[in-house]
Amino acid sequence: MYDNDLTAVVEADRSHVWHHMVQHAGFASKDPRIIVEGRGLSVWDQNGREFTDAVSGGVWTVNVGYGRESIANAVRDQLIRMNYFAGSAGSVPGALFAERLLTKMPGMSRVYYANSGSEANEKAFKMVRQIAHKRHGGRKHKILFRERDYHGTTLGTLSACGQPERHMQYGPLTPGFVEVPHCLEYRAQWDLSGEAYGRRAADAIEEVILREGPDTVGALCLEPITAGGGVIVPPEGYWPRVQEICRKYDILLHIDEVVCGVGRTGTWFGYQNYGIEPDFVTMAKGVASGYAAISCCVTTEAVFDLFKGDAADPLDHFRDISTFGGCTAGPAAALENLRIIEDEGLLQNTLTMGDRLLGHLQALTEKHAAAGEARGKGLFCGLELVADRATRAPLDEKSVAAVVAECDRRGVILGMTNRSLPGLNNTLCLSPALTVTADQVDMISDTIDRALATVLG
Ligand code: PLP
């Protein structure tokens, strides 16, 4: 355990740090939590209290767990040798990671580096817009996104955000982004089930395309499994129809793997569970498990080729740069992160432990009236909480937060989706590191069981 006196740190934090996603009006009355150390799934706070982190750093990030010396060493060695060079120059880890990554992504061909999930998605949006200008006189520029999906915090990505509470105070947004309906069968919009429901939800995308005009729609951007919008696993029948629709109307398919990517669902990428062939895949969080900031926008060679154009025209290439896309710490960490997942068999562990976790959560839906539905794939699971089992009325935010707080009190850190609009903030999120053991899975779900009983009776 960290043995320094952290009183001064806590005071500095309280006085000077503006925390993410926090209403500071009530925050100052208690000590902020400072996480000072981590090993495996455990983290310790400033008071030496140990927690089991069941959400991998709060937001589905630390896929290989805390305290990985081999990643730290790979980053250290790389930084001493060559830390950074901007833009057009390559780097050793950048080239090697791109090559290694693409072996996990048949059909994909080029890696464009950036720093965050939002930025990787912005890159894809800009590529789509530029393709519209290059090939379609600017007309095929609209980007479709799905209700409840999230793609980032910048004004461009917020314009593609299916969670209104995230963008409603930040308008005006960027024009040319159009929403399609969500596909959560538990909150059904059509009187169908299973595969038929999945096909119908995808048909709703076609209806939007026809309404907007297929010659105005350039791309469809989707999370393979919606994360912050409620851990929504699309029903059978959804993805094949989505792919068919994109091909029919010459619409580029952009899959946002910022959460699902790099092992989280038990395959390298979430889309690989569904046999689809995207044109863009964006990724961030698990790429280097939070050991360094890195994101990637990966495209096919066909997309890349569109940007070769006329070599003599100074505007006819992708006019974009990220200063810190030239940092070598990211790809150095990502390369070692990938090796760990491969050598430690973490995809298999994700499948086995994911089944176990989902099984436990499903058992909770039989035991607790408030546990409405358990959903998930691999180690990416959610438990939707309801106030009324029959009507499926969502549990209010305060009660969901109380369950999360009770788990925290019992030493397990959980997440919850969304935080402000009634009806959206009702799913407990679980995404432990891919190294999680059976005992840890059992302990995490046992803690939720007890917390539900304590808070909701
Ligand atoms: N895409 C998805 C699916 C996300 O969940 C997130 C963040 O949670 C982002 C994009 C944005 O990533 P970042 O916060 O790294 O910009």
Image (cartoon, rainbow, N blue to C red):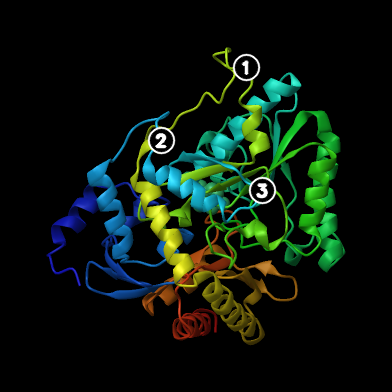
Element at label 1: loop
Q: Quadrant of residue 134?
A: top right
* Label 2 with label 3: CB-CB less than 8 Å: no
Residue 264 visible, this orientation: yes
Look at 25% across and 51% down and name the residue there: 77
Q: Amino acid at mark 2?
A: Gly
Q: Which residue is mark 1?
A: 310
- State yes or no: Cβ of the residue under disc 2 lies below 8 Å from any atom of ligand 1: no
Residue 414 visible, this orientation: no
* Label 1 with label 2: CB-CB less than 8 Å: no
Mark toward the start of the polypeptide (1 vs 3) = 3
Q: Which residue is mark 2?
A: 90
Q: Is residue 401 left or right of residue 35?
A: right
What is the quadrant of the C terminus in the image? bottom right
Q: Amino acid at mark 1?
A: Asp
Per the model, the C-alpha gap separating discs 1 and 2 is 23 Å
Q: Quadrant of residue 239?
A: bottom right
In-front residue for pair 285/99:
99
Q: Residue 339, relative to residue 373: is it above or below?
A: above
Look at 82% across and 68% down and name the residue there: 194
Q: Residue 367, relative to residue 94: is it above or below?
A: below
Per the model, the C-alpha gap separating discs 1 and 3 is 25 Å
Q: Which residue is mark 3?
A: 107
In-front residue for pair 423/332:
332
Q: How many labels sit on residues?
A: 3
Mark toward the start of the polypeptide (1 vs 2) = 2
